[in-house]
Amino acid sequence: MKIDTVCIIDDDPICVYGTKILLNHNNFVSADILVYEDGDEALTNLTNQLDKGQPMPDIILLDLNMPIIDGWGFLDKFSKLPLVNKPQIFIVSSHYGDHEIKRAKEYELVRDFISKPLISKNLNDIIEMSKTAV
């Protein structure tokens, strides 16, 4: 699988900055990077893309704790969209446990949980998992 677009949905500017550095400077992906600060902004923009016939991101890195619409709210609404090419979603969060992992397994689009901060090895694992996606 070729990775054309990575979407970061996170309200923490430091985490977003670090993730962008990893994506851009470590040559993991030569992809476009979309950044949204909350689930509502992401849903609005991704739905507009879908309505215009534009492809969805290949990978979404999703934080759980955000204002307006959190990661769970985003997943609830995004998973109901009529997606042809479904992105792989990786939850990137500093606070999660067994309850959150169990809940995430209810979403077909969620591939894995990654603990913040994202490091090179985690990003490399995400890219490798994405390449082997069905």
Image (cartoon, helix red, strand yellow):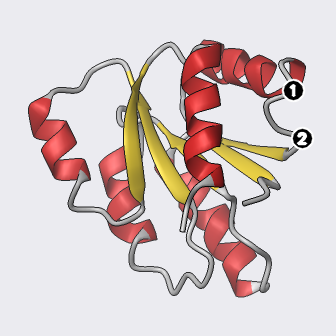
- Circle 1 sits on which residue? 27
- Circle 2 sits on which residue? 30
* Residue at left offset 77%, top offset 53%: 3
Establish if 47 lies above or below 13.
Answer: below
**What is the spatial separation of the Cα atoms under label 2 and label 1, in whole angstroms?**
7 Å
Q: Looking at the rendering, in which quadrant would you find the N terminus?
A: bottom right
* 98, 7: nearer the viewer: 98
**Disc 1 packing (10 Å; few <14; some 14–19; many ≥20):** few
Return the x and y of residue 119 as percentages of the image width and height: 59, 14
* Residue at left offset 87%, top offset 26%: 27
| Amino acid type of the residue tagged 1 in the rendering | Asn
**Disc 2 packing (10 Å; few <14; some 14–19; many ≥20):** some
* 124, 31: nearer the viewer: 124
Q: Looking at the rendering, in which quadrant would you find the C terminus?
A: bottom right
The answer to whether one can see residue 5 in this image is yes
Quadrant position of residue 22: top right
Establish if 57 lies above or below 124.
Answer: below
Residue 97 shown left or right of residue 94 in the figure: left
Q: Secondary structure at mark 1?
A: loop
* 74, 121: nearer the viewer: 121
Badge number at residue 100: none
Label 2 with label 1: CB-CB less than 8 Å:
yes
Establish if 131 lies above or below 85.
Answer: above
Quadrant position of residue 43: bottom right
Quadrant position of residue 106: bottom left
| Amino acid type of the residue tagged 2 in the rendering | Ser
